[in-house]
Amino acid sequence: MQGLRETFRRDQVWPFLAGEQNKVDVSNQMILYVEGLNLSFDGFKALNDLNLYVKDGELRCLIGANGAGKTTLMDVITGKTQCDSGTVYFGQTHNLLTKDEADIAQLGIGRKFQKPTVFEEQTVFDNLELSLKTDKRVIQTLFARLSPSEIDRIDEVLAIIGLKELRFMKAGALSHGQKQWLEIGMLLVSDPRLLLIDEPVAGMTAQETERTAELLTSLAGERTVIVVEHDMEFVRSIARTVTVLHQGSVLAEGTMDQIQNNKDVIEVYLGEEAAEA
Ligand SMILES: Nc1ncnc2c1ncn2[C@@H]1O[C@H](COP(=O)(O)OP(=O)(O)OP(=O)(O)O)[C@@H](O)[C@H]1O
């Protein structure tokens, strides 16, 4: 009887529906394999034989000048844009190029765009509740009451994003930084394995930036986090491994120190600075 009750808890995926198909095989320690990715827009190569491997639990920073291909890469990983050729695997078994955006989200890949898109008229708590209820893996309706375990999950997320005290505040009244954290929380309620986060600290105060560094660092480990960011100070404060994209390919990869001393990176950046001057 207890087993049957557990099976039909409405806040959980029915095991016979979820099956094994959503499991992410990271037995090789890698969670993301991007190989030989190509994508042209009217003859312009936005992605050019791009290869990227990300370890499970990593916090990876992706940098590169405007137009380097960072957003296009994220678009391909999340199923928003189709590539011309190449492969993208989530773990060893999920071929992401055969899936649509909804399926990829359901597999546990969450994406946060640069601009926060919280529901301003709703409270912080309600925003998190709405995200939980639109998570396709949770079988219930938008009007069903939250179960105790769902309330616990939202509480957990409120603690992670540091908005516990502001749970009843309207999201529209939050600061820019707090809105960004709330939106990260809206991804976290679905417990994603991989988070793709675009320019999280743009427009933040120094204090908010510092808090965001702590937040993203704390999220890695249990999850994998890929951050696209232009703010080099911020990247230095969080990154263990940095990948530099240039003209749709990986130009260099390593620690921030290795990147800053890499001669190809110096050449490209100095070249661009000279061109701008
Ligand atoms: N839908 C599209 N149609 C035509 N060209 C596109 C399209 N999407 C991207 N591009 C081009 O592909 C290149 C890579 O763009 P992308 O947005 O991926 O760069 P990025 O590294 O994210 O830059 P930024 O830091 O400015 O966001 C750019 O030259 C861009 O103009």
Image (spheres, helix red, strand yellow):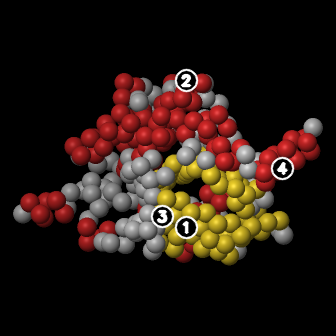
Q: Is residue 198 left or right of residue 174?
A: right
Label drawn at residue 207: 2
Q: Disc 4 to disc 2, how far (Cα)? A: 33 Å
Mark 2 is surrounded, within 10 Å at the Cα level, by few (under 14), some (14 to 19) or many (20 or more) other residues, namely few
**Type of amino acid at the residue the image marks with label 2:** Gln
Between 115 and 140, the one nearer to me in the picture: 115
Q: Secondary structure at mark 3?
A: strand
Task: Give the residue pinned by disc 4.
Answer: 267
Q: Is residue 101 left or right of residue 203?
A: left
Q: Which tag, 1 or 4, sits closer to the chain's start?
A: 1
Percent position of residue 65, x then y: 76, 48
On whether ligand 1 comes within 8 Å of the CB at mark 1, the answer is no
Percent position of residue 199, x then y: 63, 42
Q: Nearer the viewer, mark 4 or mark 3?
A: 4
Task: Give the residue pinned by disc 3.
Answer: 30
Mark 1 is surrounded, within 10 Å at the Cα level, by few (under 14), some (14 to 19) or many (20 or more) other residues, namely some
Q: Are marks 3 and 1 in contact (CB under 8 Å)?
A: yes
Q: Disc 1 to disc 2, how far (Cα)? A: 35 Å
Q: Which tag, 2 or 3, sits closer to the chain's start?
A: 3
Q: Quadrant of the C terminus?
A: top right
Q: Which tag, 1 or 2, sits closer to the chain's start?
A: 1
On whether ligand 1 comes within 8 Å of the CB at mark 3, the answer is no
Q: Examine the rendered structure and indicate whether residue 166 appears above or below residue 91.
A: above
Residue 256 can be seen, yes or no: yes
Q: Are marks 1 and 2 in contact (CB under 8 Å)?
A: no
Q: Residue at the location (70% across, 74% down)?
A: 84
The number of callouts visible is 4
Q: Residue furthest left?
A: 1
Q: Residue at the location (61% across, 47% down)?
A: 255
Q: Residue at the location (46% across, 72% down)?
A: 92
Task: Give the residue pinned by disc 1.
Answer: 33
Q: Secondary structure at mark 1?
A: strand
